[in-house]
Amino acid sequence: ERQYRHPVFDAKAIQAQSRWHEINGQNRTSFCGAYWGWGFHEDGARSAARVVEQLLAL
């Protein structure tokens, strides 16, 4: 039997997620990961796609 756990984000984490556009791309650094959403695999893929879109727009 396996027990799965999922991250639980507090108010500060959710507030930080809304600042993605402010911090991403600063100093030639981009951030992607499931933590930009609710911690699901799909959130990680979505955030990676967002970084790719940002890089292609340069």
Image (tube, rainbow, N blue to C red):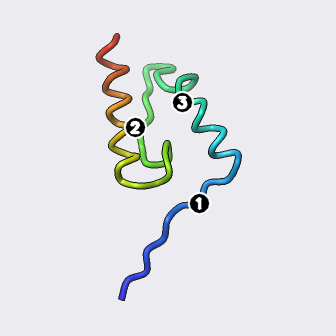
Q: Quadrant of the C terminus?
A: top left
Counting residues from the N terminus, which is met first, the one under dot 1 or under dot 3?
A: 1
Q: Which mark is residue 8?
A: 1
Q: Residue at the spot x=61%, y=54% of the render?
A: 9
Q: Which residue was labeled with disc 2?
A: 47
Pinpoint residue 40: horizontal percent, then vertical percent.
41, 55
Pinpoint residue 43: horizontal percent, then vertical percent.
40, 46
Other-residue count near label 2 (Cα within 10 Å), few / some / many at <14 / 14–19 / ≥20: some
Residue lying farthest to the bottom in this orientation: 1
Circle 1: residue type? Val
Residue lying farthest to the top in this orientation: 58
Pinpoint residue 18: horizontal percent, then vertical percent.
59, 33
Circle 3: residue type? Trp
Q: Residue at the spot x=43%, y=29% of the render?
A: 30
Residue lying farthest to the right in this orientation: 11
Q: Quadrant of the N terminus?
A: bottom left
Counting residues from the N terminus, which is met first, the one under dot 1 or under dot 2?
A: 1
The answer to whether residue 2 is above or below residue 24 is below
Label 2 near label 3: C-beta < 8 Å?
yes
Q: Which SS class for mark 2?
A: helix
Q: Residue at the spot x=38%, y=46% of the render?
A: 44
Q: Quadrant of residue 22?
A: top right
Q: Which mark is residue 20?
A: 3
Q: Is residue 30 left or right of residue 53?
A: right
